[in-house]
Image: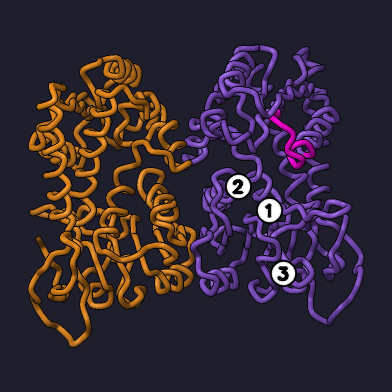
Chain colours: A purple, B orange
Amino acid sequence: MRLLGGIIRTVENITSPFLVRCKQREVHTSHSSAVLIDGLKRAQVIQKQLKREVFSMQEQGYQCPQLVTVLVGNNEASLTYVKKKMIAATELGISANLIHLKSSVHESELIDLIKSLNEDQNVHAILVQLPLPKHMCKQTICNIIEPLKDVDGFSFSNLGKFFLGSSTFWPCTALAVCDLIRSTGIESKGKNAVVCGRSKNVGLPIALALQAPGMDATTTICHRFTPHQQLCSLTRNADILVSATGVPKLITSDMVKPGACVIDVGITRIPGKKSMIVGDIDFDGVSRIAGYITPVPGGVGPMTVAMLMKNTVKAARRHQVGLGT
Amino acid sequence: MRLLGGIIRTVENITSPFLVRCKQREVHTSHSSAVLIDGLKRAQVIQKQLKREVFSMQEQGYQCPQLVTVLVGNNEASLTYVKKKMIAATELGISANLIHLKSSVHESELIDLIKSLNEDQNVHAILVQLPLPKHMCKQTICNIIEPLKDVDGFSFSNLGKFFLGSSTFWPCTALAVCDLIRSTGIESKGKNAVVCGRSKNVGLPIALALQAPGMDATTTICHRFTPHQQLCSLTRNADILVSATGVPKLITSDMVKPGACVIDVGITRIPGKKSMIVGDIDFDGVSRIAGYITPVPGGVGPMTVAMLMKNTVKAARRHQVGLGT
């Protein structure tokens, strides 16, 4: 795990198994320091459970879960994500197939492909990697996926169920964020949560999940039109602060409430010889103020992949027992 | 319009046609006073436009919009609402039919009825009046309504589209609240909006609509688990305050930012010889502090009916021109 110089407290008395019990690495000041929420470790725990479940399915004579990923074009980030998902799936015993289409493919061909995957009884889960080329309508494509196989949870029907709090395939990033917060052992009920970013696939689902029964946080959605002063005032009162904007170092230490749980969902690629990704949080400064913090990379990213695997196993299980979403 | 003793400022210089230009009625103190947002008048303006549209449809040789309302049981409030909706529809030239079922009706009979209405090409809009008897699943019933006819916007598919900000049938209360705020002429973009209440049909859709492009407010969702002190602190910073809890006098004057726009969505029936309804806002006190305020009754209620009519006319128009949602 790469640390950006933040002071990471030795955690001795915390019972949650998902926290990194790391040694104090470097002391810059005498301030207190955040506990690192290690998404990679938490993802490994979940994937271990899923592996047992997949093994148990096969022992019961069921087919292993079948995930088909559709990738259109050669977006560099997408290629990386898809690779990670394929590796994760294979390690769990999930059969993972990739259909890689040229970026010039006609939208109708993609639609026909999805329809045939919808009908294929051997396919339990379909994932269309986003973003799609500009000549395609993301919403149209996501909505064609059969809701029972829509493990990203972006079809109209699954988003509507998510809105209503029904059990279905919740968007993976929202699941990941909630799980990481729970893993710290802190109580979210009645706490102030602030989400920066209102994208339909990430920020908004996270906000909706945080206010919903189970998490029960008082939840504020900030976005591009939130004046900076207002944003600072809100984030300084946030017990839980989630940033999902893609603006590097948007959240600095002066914007964070001491002891807060800070979750970084931002991913920005910094071009250079060795491609590097950074989050929205100024990790170095904020880790001196926050109570808990996720790193980038190694925080929400691997957990989102684990949640996709969880949804895939759920889809296969529901197919086997003949349940709807 | 019933006023609970609030001081209503004379409005002279406001250009919006939707504000009541009422005379100062009663002066209790020397404090400034709120402008009354008259939902009844605004609803009349919208209904006048809709009436012209329905007339124009018929002039073009199209059938007038057909709304079918299904009422199960004899819930007193539901009977009142349904009656209001039927009267409003008839006044606009919408053909409104009521199917009134006994509360003991089996869920499967209701489902069969909705399916037959879905298939009936002469029916453009279907409304199932909520609440339903306890032996029925509200979500199952709402989701059976054909999305193209679902003018309440509660089917999974329509809620999912609403979440994504797609053009479809947004829940009527959310439409009503946004319209009333816009009618004041105040700018919501980048302002602090606080919504009290997270019900799936009212509070949550309102919050989602307020943060969405077009309204663009920084939006906070408070609910039963929000500690009172935290609630007060949030509401005191709200430029737009919407309450939809059904807790009478939850919002008192000390909880309101001077000059704020306060929208009361709460409806509580006070039993007595003459049944009376009250909202969530202590109107008498809050109207001395707020800049704009809706009354109960005569605020959000009639506007919600107007928005249902708007959705009904939209459904008929889309049917005529062969559009999907």
Q: Secondary structure at mark 3?
A: loop
Label 1 to label 3: alpha-carbon separation:
16 Å
**Disc 3 crowd, CA 10 A, few/some/many (<14, 14-19, 20+):** many
Residue position marked by numbered label 1 in the rendering: A265
Sequence-first disc among 2 and 3: 2
Instruction: Inspect the magenta stretch and tell me whether residue A75 lies in it.
Output: yes
Sequence-first disc among 2 and 1: 2
Q: Tell me where residue B31 appears, x and y as whole percent.
A: 22, 84
Residue position marked by numbered label 3 in the rendering: A290
Q: Which chain letter goes with mark 3?
A: A
- Give, as a single range, the part of the protein colored magenta: A71-80
Write the residue at 30% across / 27% down.
Answer: B149
Residue position marked by numbered label 2 in the rendering: A202
**Between B137 and B23, the one nearer to me in the picture:** B23
**Disc 1 crowd, CA 10 A, few/some/many (<14, 14-19, 20+):** many
Of the two numbered discs 1 and 3 in the rendering, the one whose residue sits closer to the viewer: 1
Write the residue at 24% across / 66% down.
Answer: B293
Q: Which chain letter goes with mark 1?
A: A
Of the two numbered discs 2 and 3 in the rendering, the one whose residue sits closer to the viewer: 2
Q: Which chain letter goes with mark 2?
A: A
For residue B173, above or below residue B51:
below
What amino acid type should be assigned to the residue bearing mark 1?
A: Val
What amino acid type should be assigned to the residue bearing mark 3?
A: Ala
Circle 2/circle 1 CB separation < 8 Å? yes
Instruction: Inspect the magenta stretch and tell me whether residue B4 lies in it.
Output: no
